[in-house]
Amino acid sequence: MQLGRVIGTVVPCVVYEGLAGVPFLIVQPLDRRCQSKGTPLVTADSTRMAGPGELVYYEGGREAAMALEPWFVPVDHAIIGIVDGVNRPKD
């Protein structure tokens, strides 16, 4: 699982049959210090509750496709949950 922050939404003009009703969100990946790293990703929101500005954890690859119903829809990344807070030891 990886940590990210929702920075936007995507509205597709054509939706795959198994993805009807699933929101697509733009997520900025974060490092262990909650700082931006890499390029933003488009993710399917399996929780259907995340929104802009929220901290989320997401999965990529085959596991992402398994997070949605029906399984194995064509997605590369999926939001698995919303994070309430992060506590990390001082470096």
Image (tube, grey):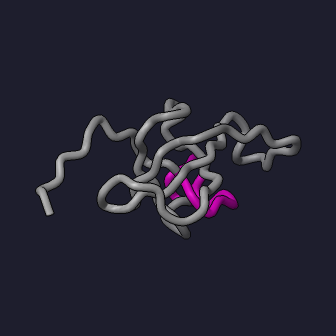
Answer whether residue 86 is magenta in the image: no
Residue 25 sits in quarter: top right
Vertical order, 12 against 78 (above or below): above
Quarter of the picture holding the C terminus = bottom left
Q: In this figure, what is the number of numbered marks?
A: 0
Q: Which residues are magenta?
A: 65-78
The structure residue drawn at horizontal position 60% and vertical position 56%, both measured from the top left corner, is 40
Quarter of the picture holding the N terminus = bottom left
- In this picture, residue 84 sits left or right of residue 74: left
The structure residue drawn at horizontal position 55% and vertical position 33%, both measured from the top left corner, is 52
Vertical order, 39 against 11 (above or below): below
- Residue 21 at x, y percent in the picture: 68, 34
- Residue 67 at x, y percent in the picture: 50, 53
- In this picture, residue 23 sits left or right of residue 89: right
Q: Nearer the viewer, residue 66 or 40?
A: 40
Residue 76 sits in quarter: bottom right
The structure residue drawn at horizontal position 42% and vertical position 45%, both measured from the top left corner, is 56
Helix, strand or loop: magenta stretch: loop
